[in-house]
Amino acid sequence: MPTILITGSNRGIGKRLAELYDAEGWTVIAACRDPAASAAPGEKLALDVGDSDSVAAAAQTLAGREIDVLWNNAGVYLDKNMPLSKMDWDAWAQTFWINSIAPIRLCETLRANVAASKRKTFAFTTSKMGSIALNSGGGYAYRSSKAALNMAISCLTQDVTAQGIKTVMLHPGWVQTDMGGSGADIDTNTSASGMKSVVDGLTEAQSGQFRNYDGKELPW
Ligand SMILES: NC(=O)c1ccc[n+]([C@@H]2O[C@H](COP(=O)([O-])OP(=O)(O)OC[C@H]3O[C@@H](n4cnc5c(N)ncnc54)[C@H](OP(=O)(O)O)[C@@H]3O)[C@@H](O)[C@H]2O)c1
């Protein structure tokens, strides 16, 4: 069976993704900051995506191992409900580090593992809030970090296509998690099942697309 590595797999959308792939018999590498406290199924892997030593240690652990799908799901929304007048500028920089830079670094670090696999896929949980066309204002740090992530994935797509690696950017919907809150539109199962279907059916021609969890293409 194929292998998937999911970041931020201990709660929210990432945990549900781990459960769905595990239920289908995939080998799930459930990466998170504190594996001992995680109830996600699969092999636990300690990985703080913002920490260079943690990324290097994970790469060493995974050396020579095929990874069919590397799903960059971990993310932060540190300026939720924070108006510009109250902006925490360091939190904005931290948001960029975790949401925009860390996923690309992880892809580059584990590129050989993914290139050696059958499915060769980089999946990303990004956000519609990173769409300039759909911007309704506020959330400067979060929105700009996801817009930057999408641009970086677009660059990455061009770099990895020759190796046969496909990419996909996924908006999970507004989801009932710690981040989305209990009043959000959909539950984690609806979100994760929808995104999984998109990833399962991903073709080379669709690589680099920005899609909703239900498969619809989203504007940049
Ligand atoms: N919920 C929504 O409505 C919504 C909408 C659009 C996009 N998204 C995106 O969906 C993804 C998952 O969000 P969620 O709703 O499931 O949020 P969540 O419940 O707040 O979970 C966030 C996950 O990211 C992990 N994480 C944060 N910083 C990390 C780091 N430095 N290293 C490793 N893991 C880290 C957290 O781990 P810890 O437990 O260790 O903190 C947690 O597992 C995020 O990328 C988010 O931006 C969510």
Image (spheres, rainbow, N blue to C red):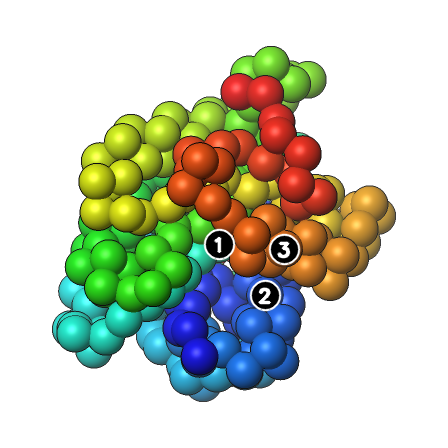
Whether residue 145 is visible to the viewer of this picture, yes or no, is no
The quarter holding residue 46 reads bottom left
Q: x, y percentage for residue 160?
A: 24, 41
Residue at 59%, 49% (x, y): give it: 198
Q: Are marks 2 and 1 in contact (CB under 8 Å)?
A: yes
The type of residue carrying mark 2 is Leu
The quarter holding residue 83 reads top right
The type of residue carrying mark 1 is Asn
What residue does disc 2 label?
17
Q: Is mark 1 within 8 Å of ligand 1?
A: yes
Q: Is residue 211 above or below residue 213?
A: above
Q: x, y percentage for residue 161?
A: 27, 39
Q: CA distance from mark 3 to mark 1?
A: 16 Å
Residue 197: numbered disc: 3
Report the side of 35 relative to 46 (left or right).
Answer: right
* Secondary structure of residue under mark 1: loop
Which is more N-terminal, label 1 or label 2? Answer: 2
Q: Is mark 2 within 8 Å of ligand 1?
A: no
Residue at 55%, 57% (x, y): give it: 200
Q: x, y percentage for residue 89?
A: 40, 29
Whether residue 13 is visible to the viewer of this picture, yes or no, is yes
Towards the viewer: 183 or 187? 187
Q: Residues within 10 Å of mark 3 (few under 14, many from 20)?
A: few
Residue at 22%, 64% (x, y): give it: 116
Residue at 36%, 77% (x, y): give it: 45
What residue does disc 1 label?
73
Q: Quadrant of ligand 1?
A: bottom right
